[in-house]
């Protein structure tokens, strides 16, 4: 039966008492359909100098078709073939207190070639794939364990790189999400110790809307709030709010609020101030934020507001996320607008990002249409002198970088 790929798994045991001896194993793989099927012999080598695992195609074995097991997997005679070697640890270190550190997989290598129909004599000893195991071997040598048992999987056939990358990405996303869930569980346990989990009240003017947060969470995540809530200013003082009592008594079964509150007054200088704070406070508690919207201009404005607030509140991680969102939302249509914006003027990181994008896409037809925007000084968010500084930075980068036509990958 023809398959798109076949895989074999072997056990490799490394012993510190003898690490200089190469280890070799062989296996057979059928190639071709029906009566034209032949057996190809392969060799997998462990070479300690330098530490690596190598896959060789040794050639065609002279066996009759009747001698090939019917259950033997076979690959087509022609087409591009891929090989993957994956190495994982199967046995724990002997000394648990000195656990052999590794990631799964410990090492992985890829190879590819164009499959030709085998001739009678066959080609022997063609290297098809290898994987560098130096880091793994060095870690083993430094560890307390004397033996290390590894699982080596060889896959031959279709390209599995994309699926491996997808698996690794899913594992990383799972790890990040697990960390977030652990953090949320810890915060939830702490809220069970109080009748009211929130002790910070954000009052927005002039709308009068209110947001609530926990002072421990704010202080642990933001040096800005650490200073505000522990300094001796009015914001650091807790008071029992009469508004809190009135709100609680709206519900007949509620217990009157006897908790003290920090009250922070926020001026709504922008229509989105409330939503921006709500988004930032949610991120502080969950590490979750979503900048994805269909309109790139809307993404720019949302990420801009978050970036400004994150900078004000000394939230470096949130600033980095907002910067990534700004980068992802840049297009030849909105890049010039972003470059000559107040945000670009106020923050060097934003200006460098926009300058780099404009330089990279300087030959884009869409960008050519927008360049006239620069000549219309009255349409700029910033003044003429500030625009000249931006133009100087842009010109310097254009002079350093050769112009080119953007590709689809840009």
Image: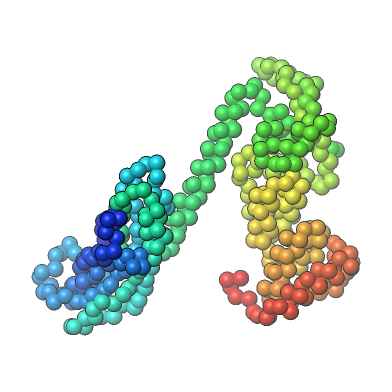
Q: Please state which of residues 133 and 181 is positioned toward the viewer in this rendering.
A: 133
Residue 261 on image: x %, y %: 75, 26
> In the visual, does 102 lie left or right of 57?
right
Residue at 85% across / 62% down in the picture?
381
Examine the image and state in which quarter residue 159 appears. Answer: bottom left
Residue at 80% across / 21% down in the picture?
242
Residue 255 on image: x %, y %: 68, 17
Residue at 23% across / 66% down in the picture?
24
Q: Please state which of residues 254 and 184 is positioned toward the viewer in this rendering.
A: 184
Judge whether residue 37 can be spotted in this image: no
> In the visual, does 363 lie left or right of 18?
right
Examine the image and state in which quarter residue 51 appears. Answer: bottom left
Examine the image and state in which quarter residue 75 appears. Answer: bottom left
> In the visual, does 38 lie left or right of 154?
left
Residue 385 on image: x %, y %: 89, 67
Residue at 31% across / 75% down in the picture?
127
> In the visual, does 358 lie left or right of 115?
right
The colour scheme used to paint the residues is: rainbow
Quadrant of the drawing holding the C terminus: bottom right
């Amino acid at each position: 039966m023809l398959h798109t790929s076949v895989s074999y798994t072997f056990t490799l045991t490394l012993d510190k008492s003898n690490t200089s001896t190469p280890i070799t194993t062989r296996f057979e793989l059928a190639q071709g359909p029906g009566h034209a099927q032949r057996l190809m012999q392969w060799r997998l080598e462990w070479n300690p100098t330098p530490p690596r695992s190598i896959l060789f195609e040794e050639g065609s074995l002279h066996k009759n078709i009747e001698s090939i097991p019917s259950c033997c997997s076979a690959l087509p005679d022609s087409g591009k073939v891929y090989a993957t070697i994956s190495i994982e640890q199967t046995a724990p270190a002997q000394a648990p207190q000195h656990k052999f550190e590794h990631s799964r997989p410990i090492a992985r290598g890829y190879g590819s070639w164009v499959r030709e129909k085998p001739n009678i004599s066959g080609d022997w000893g063609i290297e098809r794939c290898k994987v560098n195991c130096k880091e793994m071997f060095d870690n083993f040598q430094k560890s307390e364990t004397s033996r290390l048992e590894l699982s080596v999987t060889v896959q031959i056939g279709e390209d599995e790189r994309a699926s491996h990358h997808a698996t690794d990405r899913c594992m990383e996303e799972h790890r990040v999400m697990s960390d977030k869930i652990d953090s949320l569980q810890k915060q939830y346990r702490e809220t069970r110790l109080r009748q009211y989990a929130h002790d910070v009240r954000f009052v927005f003017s002039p709308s009068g809307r209110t947001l609530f947060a926990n002072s421990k969470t704010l202080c642990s995540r933001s040096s800005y709030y650490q200073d505000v809530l522990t300094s001796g200013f009015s914001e650091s003082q807790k008071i029992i709010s009469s508004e809190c009592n009135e709100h609680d008594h709206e519900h007949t079964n509620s217990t009157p609020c006897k908790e003290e509150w920090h009250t922070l007054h926020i001026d709504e200088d922008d229509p989105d101030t409330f939503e921006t704070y709500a988004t930032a406070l949610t991120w502080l508690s969950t590490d979750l934020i979503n900048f994805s919207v269909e309109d790139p201009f809307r993404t720019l404005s949302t990420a801009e507001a978050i970036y400004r607030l994150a900078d004000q509140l000394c939230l470096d991680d949130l600033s980095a996320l907002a910067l990534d969102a700004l980068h992802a939302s840049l297009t030849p249509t909105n890049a010039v607008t972003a470059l000559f914006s107040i945000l670009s003027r106020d923050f060097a990181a934003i200006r460098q990002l926009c300058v780099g994008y404009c330089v990279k896409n300087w030959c884009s037809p869409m960008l050519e249409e927008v360049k006239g925007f620069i000549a219309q000084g009255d349409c700029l968010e910033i003044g003429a002198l500030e625009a000249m500084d931006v133009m100087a930075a842009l010109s310097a980068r254009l002079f350093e970088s050769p112009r080119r036509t953007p590709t689809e990958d840009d």
